[in-house]
Every structure is written in structure tokens, then in C-alpha cells.
Image (spheres, rainbow, N blue to C red):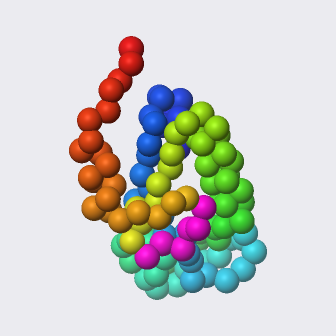
Amino acid sequence: MQLAFYMGFKRIFLIGVDHHFTAVGNPNEKQFLKGDDPNHFTPGYFGNQEWHLPDLEGSELAYHMARFNFNRSGREIYDATVDGKLQIFPKITFEQALDMCKKKVVVKM
């Protein structure tokens, strides 16, 4: 999001931001995940290895800051994640995101 902002994008779309983890513990706590990883797109992502638990509250604070900075400069962040738990950005479908990308946008240089 920071790079998209720096590059001047007016709209960005989040895809695949589930914002949900099954692991229990303190943020950034190191744990060993036995077996398959139920939290990512592939079972082997962190399966059978150490990993640090996510800091969802810290992530949400950063998402709020991103939304604030995008909005105050007339830009938008949309969440097109299917069944995601993040509640910071306006929810749209993946199809709506694609449709928004098809619309002609005038780029000023």
C-alpha cells in the first residue's frame, strides 16, 4: 500500500487478505506449527516449522493509517477478498474490482 501510494495510484484493491488466523497466543510469539499450515493458501507455507504469531491489532492500526492517508488525498483502498475478516476498507466483489479497472481513467502528466 505504501508503494502504491508513493507511485500515485488512485485506487488499490486488496485480494487475499483473510485477516484471520487459527493460532492462539500473543502477537509476535514464536511457535512451532506441527503439521500442515491452516492459515495460508498452501499447507506447507509454515507447516512443520517455527513462525511468529500475527499481530492483528497492529495490522489494523496500520490499515487505519493507510485508509486515512489514502482518503485525505482523494484516493481509495477497496477490499475484494472473498470471505475476509478485515473490516477497515469498503468491501467489494472481485468482479466489481475488475469492472472498476476497466473504466477509463485520465492520467495527468
Image quadrant in which the C terminus is located: top left
Q: Is 4 placed left or right of 98 in the picture?
A: right
Residue at (27, 42) in percent of width and height: 103
Residue at image location 64% in from the left, 38% down from the top? 72
Estimate the x, y position of residue 4 in percent, counting from the top left.
48, 37
Principal secondary structure, stretch drawn in magenta: loop
34 above or below 11?
below
Magenta highlight on residue 87: yes
Q: Is residue 29 visible?
A: yes
- Horizontally, residue 95 falls left or right of residue 13, namely left
The x and y percentages for residue 33 are: 55, 80
Residue 23 x %, y %: 61, 81
Extreme-top residue of the structure: 109
* Residue closest to the eye, 36 or 4: 4
Residue 82 appears in which quarter of the rendering? bottom left
**Quarter of the rendering containing residue 11:** top left
In the image, taking residue 26 as reference, residue 103 lies left or right, namely left
- Residue at 46% from the left image edge and 81% from the top image edge: 38
Front residue of 90 and 32:
90
Would residue 47 be seen by someone viewing this image from the given angle? no
In this view of the protein, which residue sits in the foreground, 56 or 91? 91
Front in this rendered view, residue 105 or 84:
105
The question of residue 90 being in magenta is answered with no
Examine the rendered structure and indicate whether residue 95 appears above or below residue 40.
Answer: above
Q: Report x, y in % for residue 90.
A: 51, 60
Task: Give, as a single range, the part of the protein colored magenta.
Answer: 83-88
